[in-house]
Image: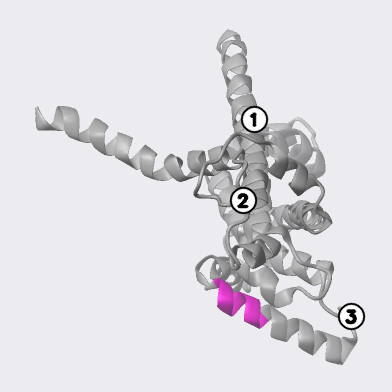
Amino acid sequence: MRRGWFLPTMAILGFVFLYAPIISLVVFSFNESKLVTVWSGFSTKWYGELFADPQMLGAAWLSLRIAAVSATIALVLGTLCAISLVRFRRFRGRTILSGMVSAPLVMPDVITGLSLLLLFVGMESILGWPAGRGMLTIILAHSTFCMAYVCVVVQSRLADFDMSLEEAAMDLGATPARVFFDITLPIIAPALVSGWLLGFTLSLDDLVIASFVSGPGSSTLPMVIFSKVRLGVSPDVNALASIIIGIVALGVFAATIFQLRSRPKKARA
């Protein structure tokens, strides 16, 4: 009897703990008052304030560009590392490569950011590149640690890959390049999409590493929000968070509908 009510109760409490702050944030984004904890009436003026704030919009556009480029670079490098570690089990330097890929997963962000800052300063003094710190250094830093996450995702998919499919294609006369693009790539495509989305999310959400490797005029969205929150939560920040939550919810809803519609097709095949 206890088990009958205990698990549902714990599940409900867990969901309330997770989603109650998000719901509160969305509700107070429509608050007329500037005080985010006192409700004084329904209003959408903070959304207007948000779209009239050039600093916030510029930081959001910069973060989106950095996240897209960083995730793409991390996807290419992480996929190459995953293929090397799975397909070529014995080669010189494999242990070092595996350790270098796994290190960003367990390294504290503060240590990673400080190390990259010292690296960029040393490269600038010796090579003259990169000249200063800005969007380029943030992209390089984000690509470095996002690559490790992409490698883990793709590596787990390649570990369960049926090699007989590639062998059959090569027996029929397909070149290695065609086998990769026609057989391997479509099969591991879900892992590639997941890795890219994970890298995009991690880059868009990063604050610590970006704070170390950024320079004047290259403040990302988390950095701008953090600077605002230190002086008190502003309602336009709630409005921005509500928009992001809405975009994510629409993406999840669209993905769910796509999966539900694709199930009958797979069953017929």
| Residue 77 circle label | none
Name the residue carrying label 3: 131
Relative to residue 137, is residue 240 drawn left or right? left
At horizontal 62% and vertical 73% (from top left) the residue drawn is 93
At horizontal 85% and vertical 91% (from top left) the residue drawn is 126
Single out the residue that lies furthest toward the bottom.
125
Q: CA distance from mark 2 to mark 1?
A: 28 Å
Q: Residue 129 placed where, x, y %?
A: 88, 81
Q: Residue 12 placed where, x, y %?
A: 31, 34
Name the residue carrying label 2: 34
Q: Is residue 183 magenta?
A: no
Q: What kind of residue is marked 2?
A: Lys
Of residues 61 and 46, which is closer to you in this image?
46
The relative height of residue 134 versus residue 16 in the rendered view (above or below) is: below
Disc 3 residue crowd, few under 14, some 14–19, many 20+, Cα 10 Å: some
Name the residue carrying label 1: 250
The relative height of residue 21 versus residue 106 in the rendered view (above or below) is: above
Q: CA distance from mark 3 to mark 1?
A: 40 Å
What segment carries the magenta color?
109-115
Q: What kind of residue is marked 3?
A: Ala
At horizontal 75% and vertical 48% (from top left) the residue drawn is 50
Closer to the chain start, of discs 3 and 1, is 3
